[in-house]
Amino acid sequence: MDENYGEQIKSYRIKLGLTQSQVAEEMEVTPGYISNVENGRTAMSLRFLIYYAKLMGVTLDELIGHLEPGYKANSLDNALMSEIQELTDTEKTKLLQTIKIWRNKA
């Protein structure tokens, strides 16, 4: 991901009145690591993001924001393609006919 979540991470720390040293101690990392994350020089691993969210009392979604809209569309397309690949040619033909009827293109 190209997103920089350092600002959100920093804002939650400040909102709770915690120092970088306090957060670092709780997460068993150095204050420099927390500084690097907040300034966008280092990305947290998923494990650290989960722990940080728990430490701050927020969900991962609240901490880093919502998924990109394109991700949901792509994941749905991928799920459909995966299911279609499992069909026989006869089933694929029936599916195509059903889709055309459903979309009024028959």
Image: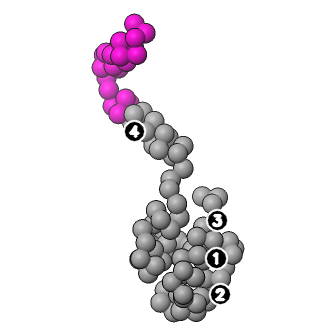
* Chain-order first, disc 2 or disc 3: 3
Is residue 101 rendered to the left or right of residue 19? left
Three-letter code for the amino acid on which mark 3 is drawn: Asn
The residue that disc 2 covers is: 32
Nearer to the camera, 78 or 40:
40
Task: Single out the mark in the foreground, 2 or 4.
Answer: 2
Inter-mark Cα distance, 1 to 3: 9 Å
Q: Are marks 4 and 3 in contact (CB under 8 Å)?
A: no
> Does the magenta portion include 95?
yes
* Chain-order first, disc 2 or disc 4: 2
The residue that disc 3 covers is: 4
* Residue 16 locus on image (x, y percent): 51, 83
Quadrant of the image occupied by residue 17: bottom right
Nearer to the camera, 73 or 94:
73
Q: Which residues are magenta?
A: 83-106
Three-letter code for the amino acid on which mark 2 is drawn: Gly
Q: Which mark is residue 79?
A: 4
Asked which secondary structure carries label 2, the reply is: helix
Task: Single out the mark in the foreground, 1 or 4.
Answer: 1
The residue that disc 1 covers is: 38
